[in-house]
Image (spheres, grey):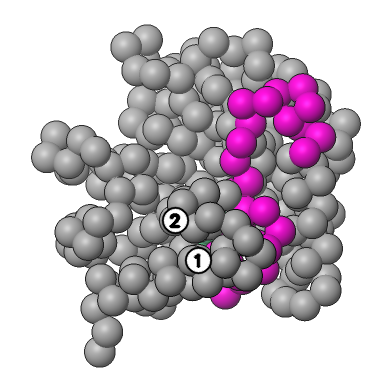
Amino acid sequence: MTTIAERLACAQSRIAQAAGKCSRQADDITLLAVSKTKPVSDIMAAYDAGQRCFGENYVQEGQQKILELQQSHPDIQWHFIGPLQSNKSRPVAELFHWMHTIDRSKIAQRLNAQRPLQLPPLQVCIQVNVSGEASKSGVSSEQEMLSLARDISQLPHLTLRGLMTIPSAEEGEPLRRQFQLMQQLLARLQQDYPQADTLSMGMSHDLEQAVACGATLVRIGSAIFGARDYPQKDA
Ligand SMILES: *Cc1c(COP(=O)(O)O)cnc(C)c1O
């Protein structure tokens, strides 16, 4: 049996190795621990091992965990990484620090309107459907990306931080092509929005390839917390 602390250390060393291979600094890559479906006790085990950034996929589950921990652990940074229906945006606007899956203007506008004024702006990424699969959410062209970025940049309570994707391919050249396309799209976005410094991509099985293609934030769930008891409903 390995512990969460041991698996967290293992994920960190995978990131460091992958960074070294392409002459990047491990410090430039944020490890987001994806705690969806896992109990607060697992989050605490990772916290006690030094982890501070956690990702959640489901509004209600994330809301419960944040409300339970925000007083006692105010240094946790919470990232929403799941699909969001516009009628459920309020808890995301009120409780999270980051939102990775903005795919349309309407969601951005609601989050902006619902963000409490005493909080710093919500840090957001545009989700890109890099594979073009009909089942995936996200903008599906450079033009759509730039148009949504323009809308977001008008909203004072959101800060555009970059791009996020969930690729379709599992491995090899098709996976690499999708990650490389994301890297090119971020470079294009940065021409207009230099503060967009984040490329959110890479999960437990493909973080090495993502880091090689410029990922600055990898979202790691099962490699830290173990297999999930129930499958992802909607990613
Ligand atoms: C569940 C999930 C992850 C983590 O996946 P693992 O394969 O368990 O590392 C990352 N990103 C998103 C969007 C997810 O839904």
- The answer to whether residue 169 is visible is yes
Q: Is residue 152 left or right of residue 218?
A: right
Q: Is residue 24 above or below residue 96?
A: below
Check if residue 234 falls in the magenta segment.
no
Residue at 67%, 53% in the rendered image: 214
| Quadrant in which the N terminus is drawn | bottom left
Residue positioned 43% across, 71% down in the render: 13
Instruction: Find residue 102 and report its horizontal and vertical position in percent.
Output: 62, 35
Q: Residue type at mark 2? A: Leu
Quadrant housing the C terminus: bottom right
Residue 80 image point, x, y percent: 46, 42
Chain part drawn in magenta: 187-215
Q: Which amino acid does the dot numbered 1 rest on?
A: Ile
**Residue identified by numbered label 1:** 15
The answer to whether marks 2 and 1 mark residues whose Cβ atoms lie closer than 8 Å is yes
Task: Please tell me whether residue 5 is drawn above or below residue 112 in the rendered image.
Answer: below
- Quarter of the image where one finds residue 208: bottom right
Residue 207 is one of the magenta-drawn residues: yes
Q: Nearer the viewer, residue 71 or 176?
A: 176
Q: Which residue is mark 2?
A: 31
Q: CA distance from mark 2 to mark 1?
A: 8 Å
Mark 2 or mark 1: whose residue is earlier in sequence: 1
Q: Does residue 204 appear anywhere in the picture?
A: no
Residue at 81% across / 46% down in the picture? 184
